[in-house]
Image: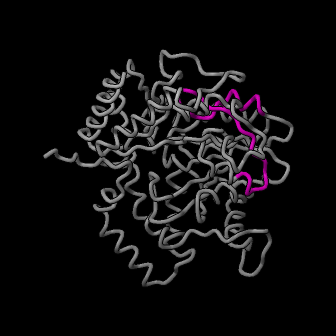
């Protein structure tokens, strides 16, 4: 009888929580005993601890990462008539946050080797209505702080960071969340720092921004029944805050484990470049916290491959004649048959999402993002992922590509 291989999940939250389950149970029991379920003590404690970890003065808990973007932008004075430059290669929540702030998202393409926002494209997209740059620290890698500040200073723009995937990520000695006027974090369960439901945070060094977010999250009321702003109900629940408070002290070592796993992947995947597998480039060294570990499969953007497509070039066909698309998907299926879970982040760029056609973009506008969407594959990545498991993943990739070439 053929043995079934032990599954390798994409994310293993049970393995993450099991060693600290006693701490989590005790902290949750304390909240239940106190009964302060909305904006309770644990939320205030976590806000203070997370602000300190990010190297800023203030942190304000909200209901989710999308609200953190929307309310954070509003608190920074961004609103109707303002343009905010956003990468096309991001989760749609980034765009939704801008729209919920009543601003206009202006999309730009990404770098083919890191998938981060193309900062040269940012400069080309700036108009008289541009008020802010919204860099996304994608996959756990921080966008260059120096280049961001240079652009912002020249054009008098606000930097508002989407750090939903980069908890304690660093680049050039600077921590995600401390680069701009403010930043948004998500605490979705699978994030590097995740809770057991939804949660988000706005961090800032600006006390006025922090106070306004506190009001906006609570019906626009700086004090009870006094509604100064047109706010909403977006508060981080105390139960979620207490889970995050327990987990925060472990985040540094969990990020180190992710970076170690990524280095192991990098080393083992190096011989597979000739078979068309190239990891996304790390320009941040140990500062990359690898929320995701992403490879490109048979991509023209891989090292030594063709140059990236430019405006006017045709993106690859999406039908049966597209070998790159078929290769990525068949590789994912082959890994699944071996019990190895994978993901695609993201299969459809923001500008091609049906709900946002009114933004005025179409296929071919952002060719690098479109090409990446055809070729990228996210491999298992989480604290505790063993070298042996990574070896098994890479062996399965090599076996599939060797037999299908």
Residue 276 placement, left or right of 58: left
Residue 84 placement, left or right of 390: right
For image coordinates 49% across by 49% down, the residue present is 167
Eyeballing the image, is 254 above or below 231? above
Q: How many marks?
A: 0
Eyeballing the image, is 360 above or below 46? above
Residue 168 placement, left or right of 228: left
Q: Is residue 253 visible?
A: no
**Magenta residue check for 118:** yes
Residue that sits furthest to the front in the current view: 320
Colour scheme employed for the rendering of this structure: one colour
Residue 212 placement, left or right of 403: right
For image coordinates 69% across by 26% down, the residue present is 120
**Magenta residue check for 239:** no
- Could you tell me residue 16's position as x and y percent? 33, 56
For image coordinates 52% across by 42% down, the residue present is 345
Rendering quarter of residue 18:
bottom left
- Could you tell me residue 262's position as x and y percent? 37, 36
Residue bounds of the magenta highlight: 98-125
Rendering quarter of residue 119:
top right
Q: Is residue 86 visible?
A: yes
Rendering quarter of residue 127:
top right
For image coordinates 72% across by 63% down, the residue present is 212
Eyeballing the image, is 282 above or below 70? above
Q: Nearer the viewer, residue 270 or 227?
A: 270
- Could you tell me residue 294's position as x and y percent? 45, 36
Image quarter hosting the C terminus = top left
- Could you tell me residue 206's position as x and y percent? 68, 54
């Amino acid at each position: 009888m053929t043995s079934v291989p032990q599954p390798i999940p994409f994310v293993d939250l049970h393995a993450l929580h099991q060693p600290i389950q006693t701490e989590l149970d005790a902290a949750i029991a304390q909240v239940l005993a106190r009964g302060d379920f909305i904006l309770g003590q644990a939320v205030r404690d976590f806000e203070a601890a997370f602000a300190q970890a990010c190297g800023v003065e203030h942190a304000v808990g909200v209901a989710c990462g999308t609200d953190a973007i929307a309310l954070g932008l509003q608190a920074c004075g961004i609103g109707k008539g303002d343009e905010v430059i956003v990468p096309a290669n991001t989760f749609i929540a980034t765009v939704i946050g801008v729209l919920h702030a009543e601003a206009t998202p202006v999309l730009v393409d990404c770098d083919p080797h890191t998938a981060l926002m193309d900062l040269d494209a940012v400069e080309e997209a700036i108009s008289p209505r541009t008020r802010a740059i919204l860099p996304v620290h994608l996959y756990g890698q921080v966008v260059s702080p120096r280049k961001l500040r240079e652009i912002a200073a020249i054009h008098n723009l606000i930097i508002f960071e989407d750090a939903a995937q980069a908890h304690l990520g660093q680049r050039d000695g600077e921590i995600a969340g401390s680069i701009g006027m403010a930043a948004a974090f998500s605490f979705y369960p699978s994030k590097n720092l995740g809770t057991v439901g939804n949660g988000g945070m706005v961090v800032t060094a600006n006390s006025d921004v922090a106070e306004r977010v506190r009001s906006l999250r609570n019906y626009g009321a700086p004090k009870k029944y006094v509604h100064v702003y047109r706010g909403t109900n977006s508060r981080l629940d105390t139960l979620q805050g207490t889970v995050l408070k327990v987990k925060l002290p472990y985040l540094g070592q969990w990020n180190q484990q992710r970076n170690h796993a990524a280095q192991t992947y990098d080393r083992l995947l190096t011989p597979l470049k000739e078979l068309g597998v190239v990891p996304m480039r790390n320009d941040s060294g140990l500062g990359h916290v690898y929320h995701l570990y992403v490879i490109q499969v048979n991509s023209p953007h891989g090292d030594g491959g063709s140059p990236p497509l430019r405006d006017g070039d045709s993106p690859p066909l999406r039908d049966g004649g597209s070998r790159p698309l078929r290769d990525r998907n068949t590789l994912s299926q082959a890994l699944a048959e071996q019990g190895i879970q994978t993901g695609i982040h993201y299969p459809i760029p923001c500008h091609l999402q049906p709900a946002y056609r009114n933004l005025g973009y179409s296929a071919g506008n952002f060719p690098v993002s479109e090409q990446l969407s055809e070729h990228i594959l996210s491999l298992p990545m989480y604290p505790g992922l063993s070298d042996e498991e990574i070896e098994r993943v890479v062996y399965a990739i090599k076996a599939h590509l060797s037999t299908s070439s």
